[in-house]
Amino acid sequence: MSLFDKFFGRNKASKEIAACEGALEKRPNDTMILKKLGDLYLKAENFKNASDVYVRLGEIYSDKGFYPKAIALYKQAIKINPTWEGPYEKLAELYQVQGFSREAATQYVKLSEILEQSGDSVEATMYMQKAAELDPAINQVSRKVHSFKVKEKAMTEPVPKTAPKPEVERTDFYDLTKELDTQLEKELEEFSIDETYDDTVDTTGVESVFKAIQENAAQEVKDDPLFQYNMGLAYRETGLLDEAIDAFRKVVGTGEKLYDAFVMLGITYRERGLFHESLDSLRQAVSLEEASTDMKVGILYEIAQTYKALGDNSNALSIFREIQKDHKDFKDVELEIVRLAGGG
């Protein structure tokens, strides 16, 4: 069984997918190839394989500390394959690592619900307990659930075959109104469960956190090109592209770290849809004396990607072919040539 088959299942007939799979065999942890493959599966409506790839990619980014990207990929996997338990647990663990206990608890609750629906009550209970440990609101609900009068002996001991099945008060965590004892009805009326668990609402305040860092930094730190460069990277990773561009431009203004700043400006401009600005920045990077031959190959690759995003496939293909002459295995150049030449 090939490495790809082990991770993602059977190969597909599509030439484009096959080319991507072949490239992945050589570079199994290449994030660009994995992202392309996931997108191809998604386009082909192979949701299971797509979600597998996105989770794998999320694990790689998580291991490297790029948590926002990992979170986005886990959420994408959940969106296209909502009944698969894997990404919920990964997302919960990642939130927990970052100290977002409530968000982690939310994912454990959702995971518990999926397991309960699939008939795995033991695992469902375990994850609900994890959620209760992380979130006081869930813990409060848990205490009320466990306050019900439950015939524990009937639930835990085997029932003789000849004996009628005893009536047991259910302790289903998910439907409190049916489970509360009548003597708690009045208390229930005063008790409300926080329903703000929808993870479409960003409760982490990422943008405000970055602004606070900028405002509180001493002036000498603000003028430090490394500080601004790292802020630019952080902004970009969280999708704040305009702020990232501003930070990278400040680095350029200091006259230091020019190569890194121009390259990241070019990439971020492209992601922002400012293709001509992207090309200008990348060309400035390639013209720097500090740019080695290998560094220039990387810049040419980014220039080709910008031409491709701009819709100029002819220029993009020409550059990819030029790179392939001396660097056949550079990133996903082989796959890009197949796609742009119409072989996909």
Image (cartoon, grey):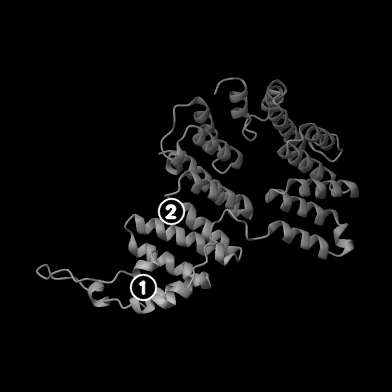
Estimate the spatial distance between the alpha carbons at disc 2 and disc 1, rounded to whole Å: 29 Å
**Tag nearer the camera, 2 or 1:** 1
Residue 209, horizontal then vertical, whole percent? 72, 61
| Residue located at (33% from left, 59% from top) | 120
Q: Residues within 10 Å of mark 2 (few under 14, many from 20)?
A: some
Q: Secondary structure at mark 1?
A: loop
Going by the numbered disc 2, the residue's amino acid type is: Glu
Dividing the picture into quarters, in which one does residue 301 lie? top right
Going by the numbered disc 1, the residue's amino acid type is: Leu
Q: Is residue 143 visible?
A: no
Q: Residues within 10 Å of mark 1 (few under 14, many from 20)?
A: many
| Residue located at (62% from left, 50% from top) | 69
Looking at the rendered image, the quarter that the C terminus falls into is top right
Q: Secondary structure at mark 2?
A: loop
Please give left or right for residue 326 compared with residue 148 in the image. right
Residue at image mark 2: 85
Q: Which mark is residue 155?
A: none
Task: Please tell me which of labels 2 and 1 falls first in the chain.
Answer: 2
Q: Nearer the viewer, residue 66 or 297?
A: 66
Please give left or right for residue 326 compared with residue 99 in the image. right
Q: Is residue 314 visible?
A: yes
Q: Looking at this rendering, what residue extends furthest in the left direction?
A: 162
Dividing the picture into quarters, in which one does residue 176 lie? bottom left
Q: Which mark is residue 180?
A: 1
The image shows residue 274, relative to residue 145, as above or below, that is above
Residue 216, horizontal then vertical, whole percent? 82, 65
Looking at the rendered image, the quarter that the N terminus falls into is top left
Q: Nearer the viewer, residue 200 or 273?
A: 200
| Residue located at (72% from left, 53% from top) | 234
The image shows residue 106, relative to residue 288, as above or below, that is below
